Amino acid sequence: MAVGLPENVFMTRLDAAASWARSNSLWPMPFATACCGIELMATAASRHDLARFGAEVMRFSPRQCDLLIVAGRVVMKMLPVLQRIWLQMPEPKWCISMGACACSGGVFDTYAVVQGVDRFIPVDMYVPGCPPRPEQLIAAIMDMQAKVRRTGTVNGTEFMARDTPMGPEPFESEERYRIQDANLVQLGGFSAAMTAAGLKRGAANHG
Amino acid sequence: MVELSELQAKFGSELAESSFRDNRRIDVPAAKLFEILSSLKNDYGFNSLIDMTAVDYLEYEGAADRFGVVYMLLDIFSGERLIIRTAVNLPDPKLPSVYSLWRGCDWLEREIFDMFGIVFEGHPDLRRILMPEEFAAFPLRKDYPLKGRGERHNFPVITRSGS
Ligand code: SF4
């Protein structure tokens, strides 16, 4: 049975149609805490013009956004805020971790800086660099769009499978020393010199 | 210009002066700190507290005391500057607050308290200023590990399916 279709009607799956629409109208939430934020602004400004990729509508309320861009280091005091912002964004939502600091803590391997936001919130795309050039961020957004088109479903069921934390386990060398030292003392079979050395290092590090 | 001999005559001979480049420093005992600072403000015209900080001398060569607390004073009319140093020790490091002399010490004392755990008695609102309220350690003490004691990992994890 031949059905006549008007000229501007096309047939597709609902998932594909929704993903196509979503991928071309990403509304970023700029979570810019440090120097990477400057590059994020440059990306949206006239020279690089993020508008060409349908992602220029930066909104400063998480309720209106579907793409979280974490640009910059996140400290202990800021992480609860970041998590709350992520939770406040309506579904479907995605997250880009921009720059070495957001991805891994960068050079700031200190007590106050979170060593990668992916330990505590889900991340879809990582952008390396310190800071990444605007081109890199644009590339990440284009990859993000491709990912949305490839995996997106109309009701977001693809997210349900991601139920494990993505970041690496926290395991510090300091922590390893502490465990080693404790074991050395417990075993008691090692030479006194080694135990003393171990204890001394432990004392210097941990008071 | 404030003379050391004059101060020594007033506050005792244990005051000692030294200098580095052209900074004059006077070491004073903690017990007389407030008295000396208020005299410097009221009698010698040091009307501005430029900065205030602390130093942890743990394992520092030749150091007798654990913490040094440093006050940088300025007379904004004559331009004279003076650094006052004092020392405090564990287990109970505390000093009188100079809030009644220079209001500007408010956040400086809070910062020193936050980073070194030195308590300023008489400060109107001595809370942490940089670290979160529930933080338990004093991170600029030299025996605190640079990477912390796991505080930076101590958050709930939000997974994609759970958010
Ligand atoms: S990755 Fe580099 S540019 Fe980006 S926030 Fe960290 S230090 Fe700044």
Image (tube, rainbow, N blue to C red):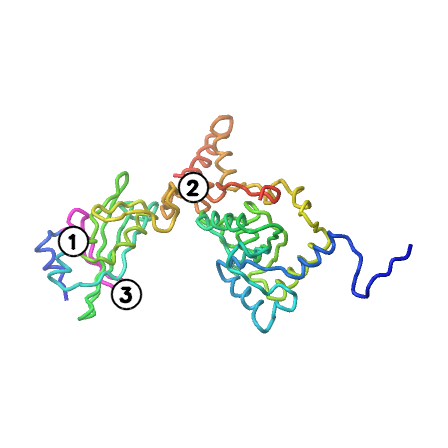
Please report, as a chain letter, where disc 2 is located: A
Among numbered discs 3 and 1, the one appearing first in the sequence: 1
Are tags 2 and 1 found on a single chain? Answer: no
Q: Quadrant of the C terminus of chain B?
A: top right
Residue B21, disc: 3
Mark 2: few/some/many CA within 10 Å (<14, 14-19, 20+):
some
Whether the residue carrying mark 1 lies under 8 Å from ligand 1 is answered with no
What residue is shown at x 69% (from left), y 50% (from top)? A154
Q: Is residue A48 left or right of residue A153?
A: left
Q: Quadrant of the N terminus of chain B?
A: bottom left
* Secondary element type, mark 2: helix
Residue A205, disc: 2
- In terms of image quadrants, where is residue B26? bottom left
**How much space separates mark 2 and mark 1, taking CA atoms?**
35 Å
Magenta stretch bounds: B14-34
Residue holding disc 1 = B15
